[in-house]
Image (cartoon, rainbow, N blue to C red):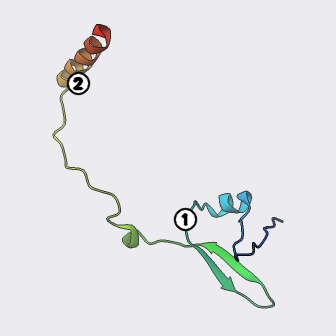
Amino acid sequence: METGTLSSKGQITIPKKIREYLNIQTSEKIIFIPLEEGKVLITAEQKSATSIFGILKHRRKKQPVSTEQMETAIRKRRLKRTVK
């Protein structure tokens, strides 16, 4: 059993074991569902894939580079390091 303490501002700290169990991070939403006899179900908000679509910036698709181009870039980088 884990416990938390209610602050004067109405805030409660969720114990680390419970945060890990719910797999929640800072600023994530928590849902409180009142049950019978003074009990409350606490769960992490479940987000649908459509609700989070578009939050990441899309990168322009680049042309793949050849192994020769990679080798050339590596050689140039190594030369730069040894010159300094």
Query: In this rendering, would 82 be left or right of 66?
Result: right
Element assignment for label 1:
loop
In which quadrant is the N terminus drawn?
A: bottom right
Report the amino acid beneath label 1.
Ser
Q: Residue placed at 79% from the left, 88% from the top?
A: 38
Q: Residues within 10 Å of mark 1 (few under 14, many from 20)?
A: few
18 shown above or below 74:
below
Considering every residue shown, the one lying at the far front of the view is 8
Sooner in the amino-acid sequence: mark 1 or mark 2: 1
Q: What percent of the width, then of the height, locates residue 18? A: 71, 63
**In the image, residue 64 above or below residue 54:** above
- Residue lying farthest to the top in this orientation: 83
Image x and y of residue 36, in percent: 77, 91
Identify the image quadrant of residue 32. Answer: bottom right
- Residue sitting farthest toward the left: 63
Residue 43 percent across, percent down from the top left = 63, 73
Q: Nearer the viewer, residue 76 or 8?
A: 8
Tell me the number on the disc at residue 27: 1
Residue pointed to by mark 2: 70
- Left or right of 81, for residue 62: left
The quarter of the rendered structure image containing the C terminus is: top left
Which of the two discs, 1 and 2, sits closer to the camera?
1
Please indicate whether residue 3 sits to the left or right of residue 54 in the image. Answer: right
Q: Quadrant of residue 10?
A: bottom right
Residue at 71% over, 57% down: 16
